[in-house]
Amino acid sequence: MNSFGNIFKLTSFGESHGKGIGGVIDGVPSGIEIDMAFIQSELDRRKPGQSKITTPRKENDEVSFLSGIYDGKTTGTPIGFVIYNENQHSSDYDNLKELYRPSHADFTYASKYGNRDHRGGGRSSARETISRVVAGAIAKLALKQLGIEIIAYTSQVGSVALTGSYQDYDLSTIENTPVRCPDAEVAEKMIELIHQMKAEGDTIGGVISCVIKGTPVGLGAPVFDKLHAALGNAMLSINAVKGFEYGMGFAGVGLRGSEMNDAFYNDNGTIRTRTNHSGGIQGGISNGEDIYFRVAFKPIATLLRNVETVDNEGNEITLKAKGRHDSCVLPRAVPIVEAMAAMVIFDHYLINRTTKL
């Protein structure tokens, strides 16, 4: 339950208000060049306090590697790492020790395990995703050597949404706005909505879109290990995610088969498809076209206003949360989506190397 992957495998540990978050990455081939500055930049994209539309909690989120890297390259042995927590305000959660926050893991966690760490959600906190970003950054560095690129961006916040596909935008501009949207005008509307939610003590959800370019043909399997199923599993394991669709997704149900099918053609000796409604995956296996998908995030459950709930004795009470919280998770979730996608693609690349001589 704390490990993800088959060959390229991450086991994470730590709690939101414990000493730190870390992990062990196993199955990493030797000889991958490790760019420490890149890994830290990925963590910086996820960390709190990076802009006025994210939680003001201040964490440097600096990673310390303990093993598996020598002279700037992976050694082929397990990579251990840790990021120490520096700015916990655990007292902000004192009033939650006996209470169950609505739409959080408090009640289900306590019912399952018989106890829980009420400080920031403990193990169920989204702070655990730090370890995923570290592992994803290493997977990205490996994929870069293979010519594979992964780009995610915010495509919708509340009712404010981009109207085009990933092909209609300059994805190199994503980092130009704090909300990580490639359309500056739409980004401003998203930011205004997030500020409005914050002022009202409320929250808002949205959609992150992702495209994977340069994927070779043959990743995935036709039955239980479909590539899109692995991506769906990865995305749905992220905190606050409520939906996943790839290719045309739900929009495809309104099309006929004659409209939905992707016709093949010969592109100078390479078999390609004239359209890509399948989202780069057919029969559970990558076909060499761009893989693209969308991930739906719910509004953050912590509201800085009065909410009705119960305590652990079942008594109905009114709760007003305290502390430092995001009004919208989307901007900080973009690198998490990329990280999980990178882990899946690199894992399946390694699996694919074992399927034939």
Image (cartoon, rainbow, N blue to C red):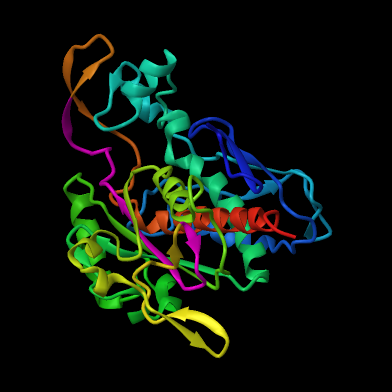
Q: Residue at x 54, y 53 (%)?
A: 344
Badge count: 0
Q: Nearer the viewer, residue 103 or 273?
A: 273
- Measured from the top left, where is residue 280 in percent x and y? 44, 68
Q: Residue at x 43, y 70 (%)?
A: 175
- Measured from the top left, where is residue 180 in percent x and y? 38, 66
Q: Residue at x 48, y 80 (%)?
A: 272
Q: Does residue 287 belong to the magenta stretch?
A: yes
Q: Nearer the viewer, residue 247 or 122?
A: 247
Instruction: Name above or below for residue 224 compared with residue 109.
Output: below
Q: Which residues are magenta?
A: 284-308
Q: Nearer the viewer, residue 84 or 23?
A: 23
Q: Is residue 320 left or right of residue 219?
A: left
Q: Quadrant of the C terminus?
A: bottom right
Q: Nearer the viewer, residue 17 or 171?
A: 171
**The image quarter in which residue 246 lies:** bottom left
Instruction: Name above or below for residue 148 compared with residue 309.
Output: below
Q: Is residue 271 left or right of residue 137?
A: left
- Measured from the top left, where is residue 40 in percent x and y? 60, 58
- Measured from the top left, where is residue 137 in percent x and y? 60, 58
Q: Residue at x 47, y 73 (%)?
A: 289
